[in-house]
Image: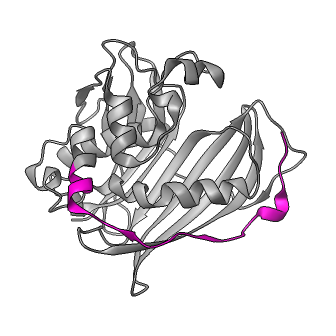
Amino acid sequence: MGFDLSGLRKRVEETPFPVDAARAGAYAAAIGDPFSEHLAGRVVTPTFAVVPIIDPMVRAMRQVTDAFALHGEHDIRIHAPLRAGMTVRVQAATVGVWPKPAGVVLVIRIDSRTEQGEPLNRQHFVNLVPNSTIPAGAGEPPPEHRMPERLASGPPIAEPRFSLDPTLGRRYAEASGDMSPYTFDAEAARAVGLPGVIVGGICTMSFASRAVVEGPCAGDAGRLKRLALRFSRLLLLDPGQCITVPIWEGDALRGRRVVHFEVRDMRGETVVTHGLAEIAA
């Protein structure tokens, strides 16, 4: 297992990605989105912004390592929402490689723009190569989005709950294009050292986004301007699996409302920590 640091900051550009209303609607349906505008693709759910970046993200990571990696953190800053009929251009690069107790973290920065060059979003896709090491880190660290310790000791302002049915992995893979087999095939999961089928990071993030849009955003997806979170534990797609998303009110930032959140599985184990969302007025 090796890391080629000469691949840092080498840019990967993806072929233009057309945003199709039917595919955006299928994505919303895969995560149980309740809004008819999202299901019809008239309004594109915020985390659909991950779909155009999956391939360039992987290609950017492969310029540094071919090792198996798990999604460790994600941070998306939304400048403008995706809309059906537009074409997205994506540029990606691995900008940081850092040793951590659990393995080596790769920080991949991805920018999405319109065909005219107008910014749509910037994402930091942070992957963990487990049980690996490097002598020293290099490049940029992941963006900061820690939840203040004082918040977790108080009651959340909301705690929505979502059931995850056994077909979720396959449905989400087909809708998103992220065909990681360990999210729907038990044998494939065990082959890479996982205990069973897991809910992928971007799928888990989509449910967290649902909780924020349905609650603090009052159903208006266009108000969500940033979503960041850290994956702290595997979320297994066990029978009867469900998640809860406790949300706490944070301190306003740059005129935006800020909320923090976690995600917990059916056993009460925390699978997402340091969740943060910035919401426009």
Q: Is residue 19 magenta?
A: yes
Query: Which range of residues does the magenta coloring cover?
Result: 1-25
Q: Looking at the picture, how far across and down is residue 255, in whole percent?
A: 31, 68
Q: Quadrant of the C terminus?
A: bottom left
User: Which of the two residues, 105 or 183, is positioned nearer the viewer here?
Assistant: 183
Q: Position of residue 34 (x, y in %)?
A: 13, 42
Q: Is residue 39 left or right of residue 151?
A: left
Residue 194 seen from this side: yes
Q: Is residue 189 above or below residue 172?
A: above
Q: Position of residue 161 (x, y in %)?
A: 24, 27
- Identified at 55% across, 18% down, the residue is 187
Q: Is residue 154 visible?
A: no
The furthest residue to the right: 135
Above or below residue 227? Residue 6 is: below
Q: Is residue 222 left or right of residue 243?
A: left
Residue located 84% across and 55% down the image: 4
* Left or right relative to 203: residue 193: right
Q: Pick the residue in front: 277 or 147.
A: 277
Relative to 186, 17 lies left or right = left
- Where does the N terminus fall, quadrant-wise? top right
Residue pictured at 42% horizontal, 63% vertical: 77
- Quarter of the image for residue 130 reads top right
Membership of 126 in magenta stretch: no
Percent from the top left, x then y, of residue 76? 44, 58
